[in-house]
Amino acid sequence: MIPYGRQDIQQEDIDAVIRVLKSDFLTQGPAVQDFEQALANYCDVPYAVAVNSATSALHLACLALDLGEGDWLWTSPITFVASANCGRYCGAQVDFVDIDPLTGNLCPNALEKKLINAEQTGRLPSIVIPVHLGGQPCDMAAIKTLADRFGFRIIEDASHAIGAQYRNEHVGNCQYSDITVFSFHPVKIITTAEGGVATTRNQSLAAQMVRLRSHGITRDTDMMTHAPDGPWYYQQLELGYNYRMSDLQAALGLSQLQRLDHYIRIRQELATQYNQALKDLPLTPLQQHPDTDSAWHLYIVRLSTDKIQVSHRQVFEAMREQNIGVNLHYIPVHLQPYYQSLGFKPGDFPEAEKYYSQAISLPLYPKLTDAMHKQVVEALKNALLI
Ligand SMILES: *Cc1c(COP(=O)(O)O)cnc(C)c1O
């Protein structure tokens, strides 16, 4: 089976992890800080806080921005459930903003309309989480303008988008957001097995996330309520978690980061080849906005279901039968039973639901060879009965 995505592990990654295994610190050592510094440099941002997953990073980001009961968090329905769940962890209520059908990203016009309504009913969100679907940045300038007008904070869920650019600058620099989150799960662009990071330009948000990832504990005497009892002393200032990244993971991440730009170039090339090979088929790749350079985590097409004799599901099954591991990103989050139990129902976000009835992610990863690429295209033609 050709999977839709997979990690690329080289000898230098293995060596980097072995060096840490033989060192004094498997966790809470120097590798985490080295990785954070390298990520901050790459993104051109002052602070990077590494944690054990993007889900944890989203949770800490919400906590640092003071999300709590009585607050609203809005995100896109076309995302992984974690982008919404982080609001629920904090006791906040979650709502969704429908997508732009062309890019699949949260639609700024739909956001503006919903904000105007929410202002009238006193239900403005405290946080909006735009998700850079497939690695293409959202229309951040438009979203930031709305944030300034309506007073909400922005967390970019850039789990797909490390290495992507928005207006020629790396995603993660937080020019248009308070905090940006990346994931290092093996299907994503670079990996630490499990892992994530939150970047920010705000020192106090960074310090809070550092504290919260390790139980809410500080060893900074300036933060303490009184002078230390002795050299062993630390204080727990608030309720935190153990969301730490280990040094093994950080060493793997730092080694992978050296190849990030190379990975992005290969992904761009593969995407261009798909565009070319698929251009006469009854489908539309997600449109790329001229302000963006996608990291191409995913290559998503929408089937022109009105122009083909087979159903979306049949195309899917025919691809899997031909050993092509296509996938669907994503099932609209509001249709998950958990969110339906909170009151959401089919029909709430029609563009997201229509997208769900047409979208397919084709295999895309650095080790996908030309032969495999051709195999995917041929399988798709078969599946579409062309
Ligand atoms: C993968 C992913 C996450 C969660 O990442 P983890 O590191 O697995 O916790 C969150 N949001 C989106 C959009 C993702 O794709």
Image (tube, grey):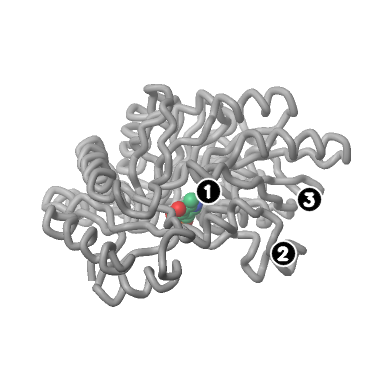
Label 1 sits on residue: 213
Could one spot residue 158 in this view of the protein? yes
Labels 3 and 2: the sequence-earlier one: 3
Decide if residue 177 is on the left or right side of residue 270: right
Amino acid found under the numbered disc labelled 2: Lys
Name the residue beneath numbered marker 3.
69
Q: Mark 2 points at which residue?
A: 345
Q: Is residue 151 left or right of residue 269?
A: right
Q: In which quarter of the image is the C terminus?
A: bottom left
- Mark 1 packing: few (<14 Cα in 10 Å), some, or many (20+)? many
Using the numbered discs, state the Cα–Cα distance from disc 3 to disc 2 in whole angstroms. 23 Å
Q: Is mark 2 on a helix, strand or loop?
A: loop
Say above or below: 116 vs 52: above
Tell me the CA gap for discs 1 and 2: 35 Å
Residue 351: x %, y % from top left = 60, 51
Answer left or right for 279 relative to 212. left
Residue in the picture at 61% in, 44% down: 235
Residue 87, horizontal then vertical, whole percent: 66, 51
Under mark 3, the amino acid is Glu
